[in-house]
Every structure is written in C-alpha cells, then in structure tokens.
Amino acid sequence: MKLDPEFETLRASFDLPEVTEDSLAAARAYEFPPAALGNDVERIDVVVPEARHVVLRIHRPVGGAHRRACLYSIHGGGYVMGSRDLDDAMFDRLCPLLGIVGISVEYRLAPETPFPGPLDDCYAGLVWARTNADDHGFDPDRIGITGASAGGGLGAALALLARDRNEVPIRFQLLDSPMLDDRQITPSSRLDDLFVWTSTSNAFGWRAYLGDLYGRDDVPAYAAPARADDLAGLPETYVSVGGADGFRDEDIDYARRLSGAGIPTELHVYPGAPHGVGAFTETSLARRYLDDQVDWLRRQLDRLEA
C-alpha cells in the first residue's frame, strides 16, 4: 500500500510509539499538538448519574443549535488510550458549521476495563443524552453517532446494541476508519510498516479489549462488529478509510455487507491515506477526507428535516 507523498514527508517527524504492553504508558502520555479552539462553541462536562465513571462533554454552538440534531461521538485510541479531548477540534468545527449539538463520551479504557465495559459506558451515555435532550437543546429523536478508529468500532457496536435494545433510535452512523475485526485476517491488517497504527499495535489493542475472549471463535458481534451475522435494521451509514490503512479491507467488507443488508451505505476509500488521516489537517488529503464527511452529515441533517 503506497503512502501518499505528503504523508511520507510527515512520517519522519511522527513519534507516537508503537503500542504494546511495555509502551502503553508512554503512548497514553503522548501529547498531540493542542487544537486551536475558537469562541463559537461552548463546552460543559457532565457526569452520568447512573454510571458515575462516564463523563460526557457537550458542545453547543454559541447562540444555540439551529438544526436541533445531536452527533454523539466516541473517541479513538485503539481501545487502550485517548480521551474526550480528542473530539474538541472536530466539534469546534462541526457545531457552528452544521448547527448541531455534539456530545463526546469518555469511556473506560482497556486493559483495565475490557469488553463489555467500554461499550456499556457508551450506551449509558447515549441513554442519558436522549433522556436529557431537552435540557441541552436537541431533538431526542434526531441523534446520529460517529467514531474514529476504536471509536468507530465502538460506534458500530453501539448501533447494533441500540437496534437490538430498541430504546434509543439512531438515525445515522459515520464510521471513520473503524476498528472492527479482532481476527486480523485481511491482507491489509497483516502488512508490515504501516504508518500510525501498526499490526503490532492492533494485536495489542484487541488483546487488551477482549481479554479472555481474544483468539476465540465465540467473540460476540458487540465486541467485534465484523463478526455480526445480521446487519439489517441499522441506520444509514458512511464508512471512510485510507487506502494505506490496515483497517482498509475490513472496513470495505463491512460497508459491502451493510449495503447487501439493505442499509443505505456510502463508502469512501482514499488512495495513499494512512490510519487517522483526518488528524493531519495540514495535508490536502485530510481536508478532502473531512470535507466529504461534512457533506454527508449535511445531507443526513437535510433528510431528517424533510
């Protein structure tokens, strides 16, 4: 998988360590360049009373949301690192641009809390958000979910769980390079020398998240959505992934299966783009990647208003 020349240039200065048991503390301590946030979004943190370890950050456009829809986001980090802070820049852009309320959930991390703990946290936050929608200025029946990397995997699992429990209607899901398949059997997942998220990091992330389930044939779909047999009844879906991302093949397959199950699905594969392409906002490829997501979100909001 040939890497785009812009990213080949950036590769030498990217120093996030490969994630293993020995390097996890260093990876968690890695500091991404701080996002320059504007004054058009107000942010508050709330604790979910029913699950006090779950913290939600609510982002609202100053002056109120116009479309009264909510985008519920799950941060990435391979199931083992990251925080709600990672979504600040995204919602600083999206909330005023689209007139929506954004909510980012802080969930417990593996290996300290393996499956189903992180998914339970995401679901508890989602239920709280819908129950308290009026207090925060959005329509409880117009909630979409999104997530990147492990957040995309949790987002796909959350959509399955919400469908099956039938308590919170999810109107759309945007899965950004989602981490879906614990089996790591696709050609792209086995490539060496991947930029940003290597096969070694991927194996560690899955081992940490699945715990005693790792390597077994009975891993549930709520843990690894690529294993789901039934994708019917899920919301409209957008899947984006880089052509130089180890998740490329599993994401393409998941989008294909969603479409085959009758789910309106849009798939974007960006040649030469590595994992986490959207974070490299100084590149033209990242700008196109993010603009395409905004275009799809805007169409979803228009659909919900029709």
Image (cartoon, rainbow, N blue to C red):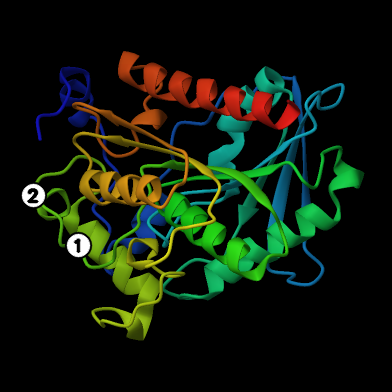
Q: Residue at x 31, y 19 (%)?
A: 285
Which quarter of the figure has residue 89? top right
Q: Residue at x 52, y 26 (%)?
A: 296
Frontmost of labels 2 and 1 is: 1
**Percent of width and height locating residue 113:** 50, 75
In front of the other: 110 or 295 = 295
Residues at circles 2 and 1 in contact by the CB criterion of under 8 Å: no
Helix, strand or loop at label 2? It is loop
**Percent of width and height locating residue 2:** 9, 29
Amino acid type assigned to the residue bearing label 1 in the image: Gln
Which quarter of the figure has residue 183? bottom left
Which quarter of the figure has residue 168? bottom right
Between the C-alphas of marks 2 and 1, the distance is 13 Å
In front of the other: 197 or 26 = 197
The answer to whether residue 224 is above or below residue 279 is below
Q: Quadrant of the N terminus?
A: top left
User: Badge 2 local density, few (<14 within 10 Å), some, or many (20+)?
Assistant: few
User: Badge 1 local density, few (<14 within 10 Å), some, or many (20+)?
Assistant: some
**Percent of width and height locating residue 5:** 15, 19
Amino acid type assigned to the residue bearing label 2 in the image: Asp
**Total count of labels:** 2
The answer to whether residue 52 is above or below residue 271 is below
Helix, strand or loop at label 1? It is loop
Residue for badge 1: 184
Identify the mark at residue 192; answer none if there is no mark. 2
Query: From the viewer's perspective, is 127 left or right of 172?
Result: right
Q: Residue at x 40, y 29 (%)?
A: 278
In front of the other: 114 or 262 = 262
**Percent of width and height locating residue 222:** 46, 69
In primary-sequence order, the first of circles 2 and 1 is 1
The answer to whether residue 293 is above or below residue 275 is above
